[in-house]
Image (cartoon, rainbow, N blue to C red):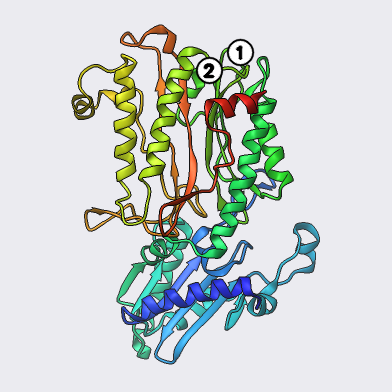
Amino acid sequence: MNHAHQIYRERRDALLQSMRARGGGLALVPTAPEVARNRDSLFAYRHDSYFYYLSGFAEPEAVLALIAGPDGDRHVLFCRERNEEREIWDGFRYGPDAAREIFGFDEAHPISALRERLPTMASDRAALYTPLGLFRDWDREVTDLLNEVRNRARTGVSAPEEVVDVRASLDTMRLVKDAHEIELMRRACAISSAAHKRAMAFARPGMYEYQVEAELMHAFLREGAQAVAYNSIVASGPNACVLHYRDNNRQMNDGDLLLIDAGCEFQSYASDITRTFPVNGRFTGPQKAIYEIVLAAQMACIDAVKPGVPFHDYHHVAERVLAQGFIDLGLCSGTLDGVLESGSFRQFYMHRAGHWLGMDVHDAGPYQQHGESMRLAPGMVLTVEPGAYIRPADNVPEMYWNIGVRIEDDVLVTADGVENLTAATPKSIADVEAACA
């Protein structure tokens, strides 16, 4: 087992320790199923993040079993067997023997033996820890397992009395990133930063949004990213006011802004960057006015992120700075407190200022516990992404119509503040116009 796989074993040990604190039991964590795209063709496979977090094992058709029992802890993997014919068609498989050794398991078995072996493993365990409601077929598997163990009651064994959603423990673990994870996220962010710069240099009036998307994909794949972390948003003109615009098929005009929200996934870790820039390389007066408000809000938000403060604080900062900006431009009327209280600013800003980031782009981890906002701690990674979306309306001067701006960075909470992992992406008006030139 090499150093990288030692990290996964340590994570499994941490989960086993938390299970022991509750009286022990059996944890079962499946990976994601393969999904058909069309006839004879599957979607590109993506393992389940919880499973991978504990195993480092990327193949489909696998289940992780962790036993915290009276005779000690056991790390068990079920996976596909070697199969010469399937490997000719679909590529290499580890098989149980190699997987056990390389990934640091105590034992490994063929996935075909799962149903036969699980009832014995689950017998006389105080609790079963598993992700409920994640995969429908897995829920069925768990129900069948419990029934099978209950059926064996006459032989003197008992079924787990408690079924616990294992994700609660794992979410808390995943919230604070270790050095290995931070290294991968830095790399993902660097690749995505370079892709956004490439898009700024490439985009021109008359091009289609998908042509810019192709440049992003080129930059991601060329640098070793395996996939996008989410479907890229390449939204020009009025499309920038659609928060999750996905068509990417409009022809861009001279005078349009282009909002790009795109990030790659590198070795299972996401990045998530948004930049907004003029397709012709120069902001107009009204575009500049909206952009400066969003930039001021974004910078104020980053300043508000530090260890010990509640997660929700920087969201309130975003609302205050944006609302004041909207008042200054005449888009909202009244006092700052009045506009915040009435929520009239939500006509132009209707989302949160960010989310956790990690293996999933909207990553695992609670935002509040016991009714209180989570407090930020070193090792947490989050996005900072205020925006302004000025759709045509009777109460809006026409010069601002269809201007949509979002600026998003990925920040790591450190011992004394933050490290902006995406700081290399041009952001000031001068830097953005220079990158477009």
Which residue matches tag 2? 237
List x then y, in percent, for residue 5: 61, 72
Which SS class for mark 1? loop
* Front one among 289 and 5: 289
Residue 319 position (above or below residue 66): above
Type of the residue with mark 1: Asn
Q: Is residue 6 visible?
A: yes
Identify the residue at horizontal 75%, vertical 69% (top origin): 83
Checking the image for residue 327, the label placed there is: none
Q: CA distance from mark 1 to mark 2?
A: 8 Å
Q: Is residue 43 visible?
A: no
**First reached walking from the N terminus: tag 1 or tag 2:** 2
Which SS class for mark 2? helix
List x then y, in percent, for residue 91: 76, 60
Type of the residue with mark 2: Gly
Residue 296 position (above or below residue 93): above
Residue 426 position (above or below residue 348): below
Left or right of 50: which side holds 83? right
Identify the residue at horizontal 59%, vertical 50% (top origin): 35
Query: Which image quarter holds the N terminus?
Result: bottom right
Left or right of 337: which side holds 94? right
